[in-house]
Image (cartoon, rainbow, N blue to C red):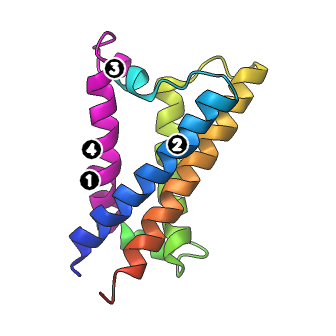
Amino acid sequence: MDPVRRAIAGGVAGTVAMTVVLVIGEVEARFELGVGGAIARYAGLPDQPALGLLVFLVAGMVVFPLVFVAVGGYLARLPGGGDPAIRGMAFSLPLWVLFLAIGSPDLGTAEGALHVAFTLFAHLLYGFTLGAVYHSLADV
């Protein structure tokens, strides 16, 4: 399978895995991540959370996976970069920092710490899944 289709398949799988973790965080921990709302506020459209959710899905399923392919050579140079799942996790860390910058509550509270933990785990899972699926489809 060609790299673009492999990357998009990995992005779809990673976005689904990440979304499940974020929904669990919202339901079980009773804190509001509001991914769509956070992205919409950042874009200057605070009353359009559905548009923000669409941006989240398109970015996670198409845009970021294509960037992952483009920077794959650089990621391979990192320690552990021979493992595609590790490359995906390394790729997801700057995405997490960006998410914290645009959608985080007060990080000095217990809720803020829980938010950081859940979103870090969700982003690492996204990257792991992106890299693993991308690699597993190489021989298809």
Q: Amino acid at mark 2?
A: Trp
- Please identify the residue farthest to the front as the structure is shown: 27
Secondary structure at numbered mark 1: helix
Give whichever of 30, 139 is nearer the camera: 30
Q: Residues within 10 Å of mark 4 (few under 14, many from 20)?
A: some
Q: Position of residue 99 (x, y in %)?
A: 48, 34
| Quarter residue 37 falls in | top left
Q: Which residue is mark 2?
A: 96
Left or right of 133 on screen, residue 52: left
Q: Which residue is mark 3?
A: 49
Identify the magenta region: 41-70
Is mark 1 in CB contact (under 8 Å) with mark 4? yes
Left or right of 122 on screen, residue 70: left
Q: Which mark is residue 58?
A: 4
- The relative height of residue 100 versus residue 21 in the rendered view (above or below) is above
Is mark 4 in CB contact (under 8 Å) with mark 3? no
CA distance for labels 4 and 3: 14 Å
CA distance for labels 3 and 1: 20 Å
Q: Which mark is residue 20?
A: none
Q: Position of residue 140 (x, y in %)?
A: 29, 87
* Marked residue nearer the N-terminal end (3 or 1): 3
Foreground label between 3 and 1? 3
CA distance for labels 2 and 1: 17 Å
Q: Amino acid at mark 3?
A: Pro
Q: Residues within 10 Å of mark 3 (few under 14, many from 20)?
A: some
Is mark 2 in CB contact (under 8 Å) with mark 1? no
Residue found 31% across the figure and 27% down from its top: 52
Q: Which residue is mark 1?
A: 62
Secondary structure at numbered mark 2: helix
